Each structure stands twice: as structure tokens, then as C-alpha cells.
Amino acid sequence: MSHPFSALSPDLVMSAIESIGIWPSGEPFALNSYENRVLMFRDDTGARWVVKFYRPGRWSNEAIEEEHAFLTELTQAGVPVVAPWRDAHCRSLHTFGPFRFALFSQCSGQAPELDNPDHLFALGEVLGRLHEVAAQAPFQHRDTLRLAEGVSDAERRVLASPWLNDHQARAYQRVVNKIRQHLESVALSAECMIRAHGDCHLGNVLGRDGDFHLVDFDDCLMAPAIQDVWMLLPMEEPQQWRTQLSEIVEGYEETRPFPHEQMSLIEPLRAYRLTRHAAWLVSRWEDPAFPRAFPWLAEAGYWDQHIRQLEQQLLQLETPLWLA
């Protein structure tokens, strides 16, 4: 049985774009994206665009449109993000054949330099402005971060895969069970939840000369504000981490108070992400793009390394490195 994206031929991509009145000057070329299919092209006026074809069955129309509405709200408030293009009827989500897609102006640039205090300050400013708007209303159709439940779901998917041998499965289950027990004690109050980017790593921050934009809100959800901070910083060097964070905090507090009280959530959030990432790879294996991009998933060495990483993270849940 072929994967749904196998029908996304170059001709179909061109026809989909033309169906909304945009005329490519050449064939779009694919960007690095696995969850969805994302391509860049120039139109007949020379403008650069990115077209995003959503993975069938992942999000409801309401969830995608809520992401788009959030981006439009942020843009209107002056937050540097890229809102989707809307047609004459104000529609941002379009359909062609079996696919749903959206169009965005291309945002080019480079990620911030973590050894540049000006970049860190500017990044903090962007996050503070994002969260100031994000805290004004909740999502209705997007996910809400649930730590223990998310880890349980990841465990089920990994253990149902064919990759782990019996010894690895037992070791994996043992460490994930202990991680879940820690996460069950972590309280995420309704008051701390805001609309968050959700996947705010350096690859999703682009800019030049200290002027940065946040891109790819595909994973936006209700989550603590610290979710959009911790992935930006390397955690291996506590002193360096503290210095970099202080610059981000200074920029963030140009707009709103930094959520220092959420610092204790960093290691639980990291544990959650580690377990969820492996489960994501497993659950997408039927997509031909994944075996090509992540062939090591089928190797025993990867799972040995992943289990060791989870064991190390379990230690961090008990004694966070950033408190050292």
C-alpha cells in the first residue's frame, strides 16, 4: 500500500498552486521537512513563496485554521512571524485533490548565534512579544501538553515496533516507567498554560543582523511558556547555559516578566521530548522519506544509545544539571 504523499507529484504541486491563482515561474523544489511536505518556488513576478502540504489525517481543518488565525493575530500585533497567505475570501487553508495546503511568503536567514549576546537579547524580545499575545486567549482545537500521558503513548508505540529485541524492550520499559512516575508528579496548572510555538528550536528561528522571525508553528499547542525557551540552549555546560539564558531573560522582560517559576519544568519537558521523538520516528516509518532520512532507527545500536540517553535523563529528573 503506497503512502498518501506518494501521490504528491510535481505536476500535482504545480496544479495545486495554480488553483489558487498563483503562477510558479518554475518547478518548486523540496525543503527539508518530514512531517509535512514543504516546497519553495518563485512566482511569475519573482516573489518567493513556500507551499506546505499537510500530512493527511494528522490535524483537523479546525486545528490548522486555528494555527493560521494565531499567526495572523501575531502578525497584526507586530510579532515577527510569517502568517499564511489568504485569498480574496480570506481563506488560508486550501484543498486540491486529496491534499490540504497553505502558502507562506518565504522567510530567509540564519539561526541566532548563541555566543552573540545581541542575538540572545533579540531572541528573548521576540519570545516575550510572542507570549504576551499568546497569553490573551486559549486554543480551542489544538493539543494541550500532557506529560505523563504523552510518555505513555510514546511507550506503547515504541514497544509495538519491531526494532527492539527482548533485552532492549525490558530496559526501555523499565526506564520509561520510572520517567513517567516522575512526570506524574509534575503539576501543569491551567494558569501556566498559554498558546506556545511548541517546537521552538534554533532551526525554527531565522533572521539577519539580529532581526529574527519565528517559523513553523505546526506543533503549536497549549503549554507552559518555558516550553519555547529550553530547546534553544545547550544544557551540557551549566555556566554557559546560565549566561546565555540571562541574555534571553533580559530581552524577554522588555515585554513581560520571565516565568522563572517554570524552570523546574525544563527536565520533565526534556524527558517528554526524548521519548516522544523516538515514538514519532517509529510511527512514521511507513512514510518512505523516513527510512531514507533515518536509516539508523532500524539498527540495534540506536536503541541501545536511546535507552542510555533516557537513563541519563532520569538522573537529570532527580538532580537537574542546571542546578549544579
Image (spheres, rainbow, N blue to C red):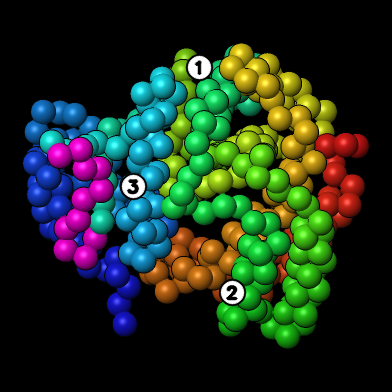
Estimate the x, y position of residue 44 in percent, counting from the top left: 9, 33
**First reached walking from the N terminus: tag 2 or tag 3:** 3
Q: Nearer the viewer, mark 1 or mark 2?
A: 2
Q: Amino acid at mark 1?
A: Gly
Q: Nearer the viewer, mark 2 or mark 3?
A: 3
Q: In this figure, which residue is indicated by the disc labeled 3? A: 65
Q: Is residue 291 above or below residue 74?
A: below
Q: Amino acid at mark 3?
A: Glu
The secondary element bearing badge 1 is classed as loop
Q: Residue at x 44, y 23 (%)?
A: 79
Q: In this figure, which residue is indicated by the disc labeled 1? A: 210
The picture quadrant where one finds residue 246 is: top right
Q: Amino acid at mark 2?
A: Arg
Q: Residue at x 23, y 32 (%)?
A: 48
Estimate the x, y position of residue 18 in percent, counting from the top left: 10, 47
**First reached walking from the N terminus: tag 1 or tag 2:** 2
The secondary element bearing badge 2 is classed as helix
Q: Main secondary structure of the magenta part?
A: loop
Q: Is residue 12 above or below residue 117?
A: below
The residue closer to the viewer here, 93 or 203, is: 93
Q: In this figure, which residue is indicated by the disc labeled 2? A: 157
The picture quadrant where one finds residue 131 is: top right
Estimate the x, y position of residue 17 in percent, counting from the top left: 15, 47
Q: Which residues are magenta?
A: 89-99
